[in-house]
Amino acid sequence: MGGTVETKLEAFSAVPIFPTMIWASQLRPDVVARINSAFTMVLEKARRKQANLEPKGKWQTDQRLHTLPELEEFVTLTLGLCRHVLDADKIRYRDLQITGCWANIGFPGSRHRPHAHPNNYFSGVYYVKAPRGGNTITFIDPRPQAGVMVAPADQVSPGHAQNITVDVHPGSLIFFPSWLYHSVDDNRSREERISIAFNVMFKPFVEDMSPPQWEGNLKVSQD
Ligand SMILES: [Fe+2]
């Protein structure tokens, strides 16, 4: 009757049956240089046109950056990564589309409260500027029941953490299921944080439901 537990088993598995994925890339430096210079030019032009905006809090551009020809490399890369994930997961689909893409310029002290991105499949963010002290994004455990019993743990683990904070850098591109709640901590640096947010949806769903239902305060697109 004695012996350790292990001696009594033929097999044992811990199986992640409903995992929540985030897909994180760091782009190569030459690609970062090109894409960041394209975003910087677009944003500088927009800022010159609207010099009356006060440099505090957070600015958000309108949401059609993906339609600008100078940002084509970013759009193609983003959609390519999304297709890669769908193909690896054997998802059946015809085509994908970016339904909204906008820049967030976060001045020191700015943050973004927990939110999700309804009516899309993937959402994500690319970092043009992520100064130290303003270089994180936090994801919130999507299982409400999990917060009923929070056992003390010696280290943060995706299996039992309530929030997971990820460090980002200029050139980081992270995307995740659009329903996953996330937030951005205070920008504790003295510099601007510039991130590019985007939503991606299956093309046949797109026309009315998926584009953002809000307006930014920094005008970029030409309509
Ligand atoms: Fe977001």
Image (cartoon, rainbow, N blue to C red):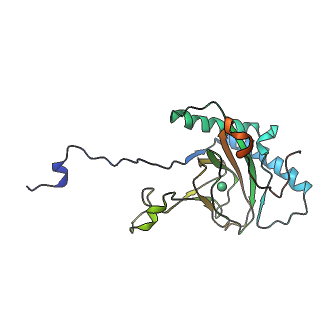
Quadrant position of residue 79? top right
Seen from the viewer's position, the closer of residues 169 and 162 is 162
Which residue lies at the image location 57% right of the left edge and 35% below the top edge?
84
The picture quadrant for ligand 1 comes to: bottom right
Which residue lies at the image location 74% right of the left edge and 56% below the top edge?
104
Which residue lies at the image location 38% right of the left edge and 67% below the top edge?
151
Give the quadrant of the N terminus. Answer: bottom left
Q: In the drawing, does residue 28 fall left or right of residue 159?
A: right
Seen from the viewer's position, the closer of residues 50 and 100 is 100
Whole-percent x and y of residue 12? 27, 47
Give the quadrant of the C terminus. Answer: top right
Seen from the viewer's position, the closer of residues 25 and 58 is 58
Whole-percent x and y of residue 32? 69, 44
Whole-percent x and y of residue 97? 69, 38
Quadrant position of residue 187? bottom right
Name the residue at the left extreme: 1
Q: In the figure, 42 relative to 72: above or below?
A: below
Q: In the drawing, does residue 81 fall left or right of residue 213?
A: left
Name the residue at the top extreme: 94
Seen from the viewer's position, the closer of residues 108 and 88 is 88
Whole-percent x and y of residue 118? 65, 51
Q: How many marks?
A: 0
Q: In the figure, 26 relative to 77: above or below?
A: below
Q: In the drawing, does residue 147 fall left or right of residue 202?
A: left
Which residue lies at the image location 68% right of the left edge and 35% below the top edge?
204
